[in-house]
Amino acid sequence: MPKMKRHSGMGKRVKITGSGKILRQQTGLRHRLEVKSSHETRSLSGTVEVAKADVKRVKKMLGR
């Protein structure tokens, strides 16, 4: 049986906390920043939890 390989790209995109939650960056901060208001830019910064519907898929990609 071959080894289970994790998805290296997913490992770069998410972080697992000590309690087991999976955190990700919010989308929308890569381009068109001149158009967005400062309030919107600030609210998009920081990390959020991965959606409940996606947790199973992300964990599988991480090999957990």
Image: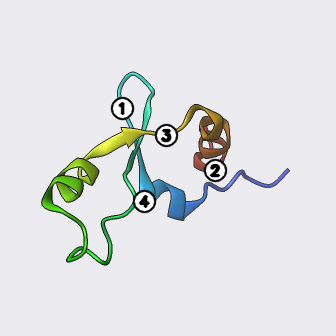
Q: Which residue is mark 2?
A: 61
Around disc 3, counting alpha carbons within 10 Å, would you say few (fewer than 14), some (14 to 19), or many (20 or more)?
some
Q: Position of residue 26 (x, y in %)?
A: 37, 52
Of the image marks 3 and 2, the number of the one nearer the N terminus: 3
Outermost residue to the left = 38
Query: Is mark 3 in CB contact (under 8 Å) with mark 2?
Result: no
**Element class at badge 3:** loop
Q: Residues within 10 Å of mark 4 (few under 14, many from 20)?
A: few
In the figure, is residue 53 to the left or right of 43?
A: right
The residue indicated by pointer 1 is 17
Q: Residue 63 has which mark?
A: none
Work out how far the residue at label 1 is from the one at label 3, CA to CA, in angstroms. 12 Å
Q: CA distance from mark 2 to mark 4?
A: 12 Å
> Which callout, 4 or 1, points at the residue further toward the start of the chain?
4
The answer to whether the residues at label 1 and label 2 have Cβ atoms under 8 Å apart is: no
Please tell me which of labels 2 and 4 falls first in the chain: 4
> How far separated are the C-alphas under marks 3 and 4?
14 Å
Asked whether disc 2 touches disc 4, contact meaning CB atoms under 8 Å apart, the reply is no
Which residue position is annotated with label 3?
Answer: 50
Q: Residue at x 24, y 67 (%)?
A: 36
Image color mode: rainbow
